Amino acid sequence: MTRNIELKSQNGYMIPCEYDIEEGDRAVCVICHGFASSKASSTAHMVSRMCRSAGVGFLTFDFPCHGESRAVFTGLTPKNCLDDLRTCELWAREQSKGGEIIYFGSSFGGYTVLGHLCTREHEGRLALLRSAAVNMDRVFDPFMEDIKNEMAEKGYFTYKSGFGPDLRLSPGFFESLKSFSPFDYDLPEGADVHMIHGARDTVVDFGQALKYSLRKNCPIDIMALSDHSIADRDGIKRLRELVSVMLEKVK
């Protein structure tokens, strides 16, 4: 049965979570949503349903200032997102009484999972990344002049995603963002990471994803007709297949 809980963040706010974890679950998938999205995304719901059908628990949560989060805008930093992922995975593992932790990350969530695996103490080794923002640390570079001007005037930059609520990005967000580039770190020994990316992605260029895949020896599926959302028929079919493969690995 799906339930909701708020976990206390290391940074003073509460982390809204949705989960279905049973004592004795052999594994729990921690699901990380994309930038300006939320734990209520259609992809998160698809993955969570597949997990439960396979006898795997799941926990999906809202990053600061996303979804049901009540954190103030200065709480949204990549560093805080990493802290929250750690809080969530430890709680999830405790609820399952030691189940294996696995990860699913979309876009910014994929960037966060890579940061977690490469720079933080972590419980899991197995991850599936959809449209991972492997160049997140550089994605705002073309707009930095406008960003600096707006921050000088207002103290924040308003990010308009076009598909979700506007986000106020603080100077601390950009400082934290520059502290981690996935290209600068190797995946830890034993990590099993698979990527799927759309060739028509205009948010995170698939060329960057392919470059990351080749440099880090990380398998990738490039979907010729998919954009960033991977919402076309073939893209969804392949994504579901990859989720099933990941779940098979923890049987």
Image (tube, helix red, strand yellow):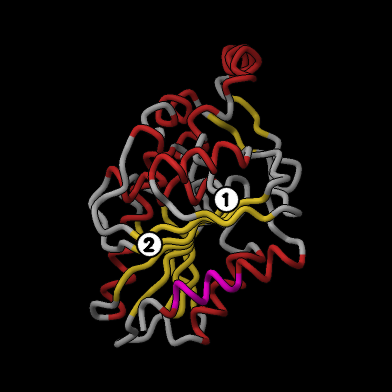
Q: Can you tell which quarter of the image residue 24 is in? A: bottom left
Q: Is residue 213 above or below residue 136?
A: below
**Where does label 2 land, which residue?**
7
Chief SS of the magenta region: helix
Is residue 245 on the magenta stretch?
yes
* Separation of marks 2 and 1 at Cα, in angstroms: 20 Å
The residue shown at (30%, 63%) is 124
* Magenta span includes 238: no
Magenta stretch, residue numbers: 240-247
Residue 221 drawn at (x, y percent): 57, 57
Between label 2 and label 1, give the one nearer the viewer.
1
Q: Secondary structure at mark 2?
A: strand
At label 2, the amino acid type is Leu
Q: Which residue is mark 1?
A: 34
The residue that appears at 40% across and 38% down in the rendered structure is 182
Q: In the image shown, does 46 or 165 lie closer to the viewer?
A: 46
The C terminus appears in which quarter of the rendering? bottom left
